[in-house]
Amino acid sequence: MIKKHEIYKTDKWNMMTVEVQGRYIILREISDQWGEETHTFLSRPALMQWVNNRFNKESYRDNEEEYNRIMAAFKQV
């Protein structure tokens, strides 16, 4: 069974999708700057560690609401 979550989207070219496929968590990050990157995680703690490194709170100082929305979406995976 595959569960798919759309985590982050500012427009149709900048988004993240997370697919939970059994014990694997596959994250696809699509952006207009870098194209598509795929990351595979074996656990939710490993995913959350990557999320905390990728979305550090200091870079969202001016937009804390967006940071909280992104973190809440990842915690629901």
Image (cartoon, grey):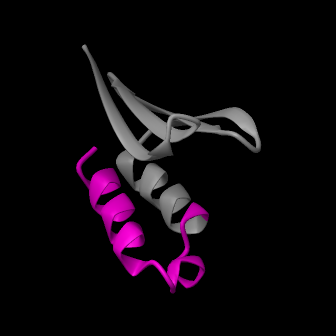
Q: Residue at x 34, y 74 (%)?
A: 65
Q: Which residues are magenta?
A: 54-77
Seen from the viewer's position, the closer of residues 31 and 17 is 31
Q: Residue furthest front?
A: 11
Number of marks in the rendered image = 0
Classify residue 1 by image quadrant: top left
Q: Residue furthest top?
A: 1
Quadrant occupied by the C terminus = top left
Q: Residue at x 47, y 52 (%)?
A: 46
Q: On screen, 23 above or below 8?
A: above
Task: Please indicate whether residue 57 sits to the left or right of residue 18 in the image.
Answer: right
Classify residue 54 by image quadrant: bottom right
Residue 13: x and y in percent read 58, 36
Q: On screen, 65 above or below 2?
A: below
Task: Please indicate whether residue 8 sits to the left or right of residue 39 in the image.
Answer: left
Task: Please indicate whether residue 26 sits to the left or right of residue 1 in the image.
Answer: right
Q: Residue at x 54, y 57 (%)?
A: 50
Asked whether 64 falls inside the magenta stretch, the response is yes
Q: Residue at x 51, y 84 (%)?
A: 62
Secondary structure, magenta segment, majority class: helix
Residue 44: x and y in percent read 37, 48
Residue 29: x and y in percent read 58, 39
